[in-house]
Amino acid sequence: MGDPISGLRQRSGSGIVQRVRLENFMCHSSLQIELGDWVNFITGQNGSGKSAILTALCVAFGSRAKGTQRASTLKDFIKTGCSNAVVQVELKNQGEDAFKPEIYGDIITVERRISGTTSATVLKDKQGRRVAARKEDLRELVEHFNIDVENPCVVMSQDKSREFLHSGNDKDKFKFFYKATLLQQVEDLLQNIEKQLEKAGVVVDELEGSIRPIERELNELQEKIKSMEHVEEISQKAKQLKKKLAWSWVYDVDKQLQEQNLRIVKLKDRVPRCQAKIDEKIGQVVKLRECFTLKKSEIDQMMAKTSEIRRMKDELQQTLTLATKEKIGIGEEYSRKANHIQKLMNAVRSLQQQIEDTQEQHAKHTQAEESAIEEKLKELQNEVSTVESMLTRLKEEESALSECIQQINNEIREINQMIQNIDKNRREISSVIRELRQNQTNKVTAFGGQQVIYLLQSIERHHQRFTSPPIGPIGAHLTLNNGDVWGPAVEHAIGRLLNAFIVTNHKDSLLLRACAKEAKYNNVQIIIYDFSLPRLHIPPHMLPQTEHPTTLSRVHSENHTVLNVLVDRGDIERQVLVRDYDVGKTVAFDQRISNLKEVVTLDGSRMFSRGSVQTVLPPNKRVRTGRLCSSYDDQISDLERQAKSVEEEDKQCMRRKRNAEQNLQDLQEKLRNVKRRRAHADRDLASKRIALQDSAYAAEASTSPASTVDELHQEISKMQEEIQEKKMLLQKFRERTDEAEAKTHDLKVSYEKLCESAKGDIDAFEKAERELMETEENLASAEDVSSAFLKLTRTHIREKAHYEGVMRNKVLRDIQEAEKEFQQLEHHREENCRKASILCPESEIIAMGDWDGSTPEQLSALLTRLNQRLERESQRFTESIDDLRLSYKKKERKILERQKKYRAYREKLHACQKALNLRRSKFERNANLLKRQLTWHFNTHLGRKGMSGKIKIDDRERTLAIEVKMPQDASSSTVRDTRGLSGGERSFSTLCFTLSLHEMTEAPFRAMDEFDVFMDAVSRKISLDTLVDFALVQGSQWILITPHDISMVKNGERIKKQQMAAPRS
């Protein structure tokens, strides 16, 4: 009935329980039981400890306390009154299936010790030596021998027997079938795998979703790159246009050269025509000059005839003109003198009238009016003095108020400066408090701020690329010894090295620099040092011999590389720390300590001497101390107190400022009032001064009439004297006039006499005059002809000079200027060509295509528009296209790697899902095969009693129903349910079901407890015989525990019966 190969394997003794020993386990103080290789019956009364053997087997092979259904914890198995328990199970380890026989030998002892708090499992070899003590070793042993103590077909305890064998519930039978055939375990594994695949699918979905923002960024980058490429196209067009512009100047000069050449040719063509006209005009001028010479000689002859007559006529006319002018001048002078005398006489009459008016006005004034005027003058003078004194007082008051206002303004400016300083101090304190709180949260931020966090994150992302992980910042790896007293001095002594990072080689230095650039941590200090070097030990004689501490003695670090760097780079072993300035000077300059580099005080002063030069450096105010302190609470409390005092000081300053501003407003109001009063006083003083001046003038006019009359009499006397003088001059002019008239009369008489005496001469003169008239007419005509010839000659000369000037100043000069301009254009072309060749060769311009004839101005305007457009487009993008492309490639590479990775994950998930579906289909196929196999084995076992049956398994409802057909029902087709059978028949059919399951499973041993408690004697006899026969044929070791009598079981060498001792009362 069983598998003969399996039987042979079990008979070889591999995995069979040889001995079980219990100490202080459950009800046994000490129990040792030997088991046979085949069938073992253990009987005894209730309470004798039979079931403890099965429980011990389960515990020894790793079962949990709840899995045995006998206790909730392992310590509950310890016998009452004892502190620990021991379970030992010896297994045979022989044959081909032996487990590591070279290590354990042919006996393996599994020992589990249980205490109140722990339990331990040990595997021993044949000699009892400890070989292994791990759970993995026990699991490997159990899996090798296929010992599954939780399988009811391997170990069936009382509870499992009642649950599965003696229960009429189909669901319990289904559970029994699934557990016995390991289908339950496989199904649980498949379900667990399915859940894991679902979780993995969700994770992959999340991972795939996580790259969508990067894909969007990638698309945005691609759009930016396209826009930047458009900008590059514009830039390229601008460059080409710039090249074209450079060569356009050359081509424009070529065009100008061609035009200038044509102009020179045209100008040179004008030279022969101008020369021909000049020659023609020269001939005409020669002819006209000959004619002019003839006319000139005729005119000279005529002029000789008329010159004497003209001379006599001119002399006579001149004499007559002088006489007439002299007469007219004397008459005019006489008229002027007479008018002046008349004006003086009028002025005398006016002065006499003024004297009479003054005397009449003086007679009207009295003595009383004069005294009133004097009193009024005194009153006005007093009023003016009063107003002047008040004005002086107002000016002094205005000056005092202005000084007070100026002082208050200065005070307000000082208060504003104090408020600004206080605000600056408050902001600095708040900033330090924020930094300290940030440092309190994360000490690393004290040595570089938030940027160092970004740098460390970047280092973490790229840690696989470093040869050794960088160390830093150094300050984060340092602590202070003996409290925080020397913390400020240590920080001043170490200085910038606190923020430095340490790498092991140059490659890591470059990589760390790239990480710093990525984190935007500029000017990071990187120190290259060999991490493999051991801790430096400095001999005492190389240290400063002083009682004061050194920097090395006050710092501690778990990383020896940090201390090595501080010693090598910072010389901290030679830096001596002192408390104050005076002690520092004594140590640095007076004591002459050897191996001393410098002395550092608590406030940060540095002192050192190099030869005879002593140097003292003041504290660096920019260095913030307290970063190495173990706690920042005290510093924060001090700073908060400082902030409160600063806030109070700010409030006091604000109150002072408000009071000063109020005082300033009051003083300004007073100053405005004083100014208004002073302006009013100025106006009043001016009006009173004017009134006083008017009154003084009136009084003066009233008191001096006599003096005015005398002055007027004197002025009249002077005028009368002047009148007499003018009359005497007028008499002289009258005498001269009479003389001139007499002279004129004499000349007239002489002229008449001359005319009468020269009458013949006059006739001759009249004749000569007529000849002269004719000569003058001839002369005029001759002069006209001569003038015409001369004019014509001059015209031809001017024309000749014009053409010569045109030739000299226009044609030849234009030709010279054109040739000079041509040479300049050639030079300009060479210069432009040289400049253009620097930008690009002309062949490149030719390769661009035919020249479209654009002028440089057009190209320059187009280039300006392109540059403006390029500038506008460039302002939209802060990064260069190379950076964008590099970023795009990085992100593209990153996203492609992720996509590839996630695609691989998805493919693996699909492969796992496919494998799971395949396993599930195989599981279903195997389950169906096991169902059919179970029914076949079940019918086989029932057939021994002439019975037949059927097992119905419903996977959906998870039920297993047993139907049995009795021999007496052979004639009919009715099949009854086991609930319709008698107790013995039902127990036998259940036993057949159990044996069928046993036949489908493999194990080196099987144990059953109280499997026959509900059977009658006949059914028990049949069941025991069937069970023994099955066990002998099946080949496994069987351990059967029952409280009933087993004398009915046949004896044999393969059947071992043992009786447990009765329990003590």
Image: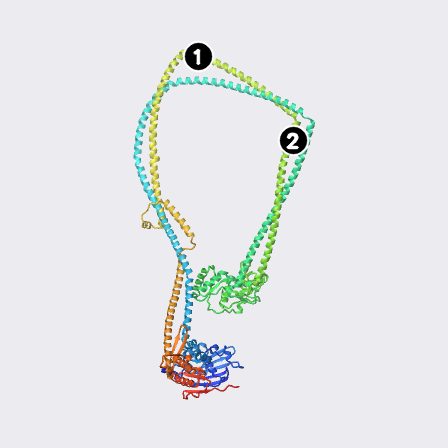
Residue 61 spot, x, y in % from top left: 45, 79
User: Is the residue marked by circle 1 packed among few (<14), some (14-19), or many (20+) residues within 10 Å?
Assistant: few
Which residue occupies the foreground of this view, 149 or 568?
Answer: 149
> Residue type at mark 1?
Leu
The disc label shown at residue 684, or none: none
* Picture residue at 64% right of the left edge, 40% below the top: 392
User: Is the residue marked by circle 2 packed among few (<14), some (14-19), or many (20+) residues within 10 Å?
Assistant: some
* Residue furthest out toward the front: 972
> Residue type at mark 2?
Ser
The disc label shown at residue 695, or none: 2
> How many numbered callouts?
2
Measure how far apart labels 2 and 1 are at the Cα level: 83 Å
Which residue is identified by label 1?
754
Residue 222 spot, x, y in % from top left: 39, 57
- Please give left or right for residue 260 compared with residue 594 in the image: left
Which residue occupies the foreground of this view, 385 or 119?
Answer: 119
- Please give left or right for residue 1 compared with residue 380 in the image: left
Kindly indicate the quadrant of the structure image that contains residue 1004.
bottom left
Residue 306 spot, x, y in % from top left: 38, 18
Kindly indicate the quadrant of the structure image that contains residue 395.
top right
* Picture residue at 39% right of the left edge, 19% below the top: 307
Which residue occupies the foreground of this view, 34 or 756?
Answer: 34
- Please give left or right for residue 43 compared with residue 838 in the image: right
Name the colour scheme.
rainbow
Q: Are marks 2 and 1 in contact (CB under 8 Å)?
A: no
Does 212 appear above or below 297?
below
In primary-sequence order, the first of circles 2 and 1 is 2
Which residue occupies the foreground of this view, 620 or 350?
Answer: 350
Does 706 appear above or below 664?
above
Residue 849 in view, yes or no: yes
